[in-house]
C-alpha cells in the first residue's frame, strides 16, 4: 500500500475539501478548542493559522500561534476517519499530482 506524505495546503484548498458541517467544527475548535502550553489553557482569543497540512492519514493539521500570548500551537482534525472525506482527499492528491 502506498503511503501518503503530509501536504501543505492553503485555505482555499481546505474549503474545497471540507463540507459545511466540517467547516463549522473547524471554526469552533480554532476559536475554543486549541490548547496553548504557554498560556496553560485553551486559546481563549482563538488561533492565527500559519500552516495547514493534509496529513498522511488525510487528517487536517494546523500550526499557528495563540492570539492571546503568541505561543506556538498545533491541532489535528481527524477528518480522515470520514470515508467520504478520505476519498475526496485522495482525489485531491491525485489532481494536484497530475499538474
Image (cartoon, helix red, strand yellow):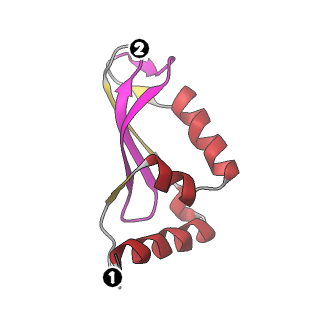
* x 41%, y 19%: residue: 67
Q: What residue occupies the far right of the structure in this picture?
A: 21
Q: Tell me if residue 77 can be seen.
A: no
Local packing at callout 1 (Cα closer than 10 Å; few below 14, some 14-19, many 20+) is few
Quadrant where the N terminus sits is bottom left
Where residue 52 appears, x then y in whole percent? 39, 47
43 sits left or right of 21 in the view: left
95 sits left or right of 2 in the view: right
Would you place residue 90 above or below residue 52 in this image?
below
Q: Which mark is residue 2?
A: 1
Q: What residue occupies the far front of the structure in this picture?
A: 99
Q: Earlier along the polypeptide chain: callout 1 or callout 2?
A: 1
Quadrant where the C terminus sits is bottom left
Q: Which mark is residue 68?
A: 2
Where residue 26 appears, x then y in whole percent? 57, 42
* x 56%, y 58%: residue: 16
* Magenta stretch encompasses residue 82: no
Magenta stretch in the rendered image = 39-67
Q: Tell me if residue 45 can be seen.
A: yes
* x 55%, y 63%: residue: 81
Q: CA distance from mark 1 to mark 2?
A: 41 Å
Q: Are marks 1 and 2 in contact (CB under 8 Å)?
A: no
* Magenta stretch encompasses residue 49: yes
Amino acid at each position: 500500500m502506498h503511503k501518503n506524505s503530509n501536504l501543505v495546503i492553503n485555505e482555499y484548498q481546505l474549503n474545497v475539501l471540507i463540507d459545511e458541517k466540517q467547516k463549522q467544527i473547524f471554526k469552533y475548535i480554532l476559536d475554543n478548542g486549541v490548547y496553548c502550553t504557554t498560556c496553560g489553557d485553551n486559546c481563549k482569543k482563538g488561533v492565527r493559522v500559519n500552516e495547514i497540512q493534509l496529513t498522511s492519514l488525510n487528517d487536517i493539521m494546523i500550526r499557528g500561534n495563540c492570539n492571546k500570548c503568541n505561543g506556538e500551537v498545533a491541532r489535528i482534525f481527524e477528518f480522515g476517519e470520514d470515508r467520504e472525506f478520505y476519498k475526496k482527499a485522495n482525489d485531491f492528491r491525485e489532481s494536484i499530482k497530475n499538474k
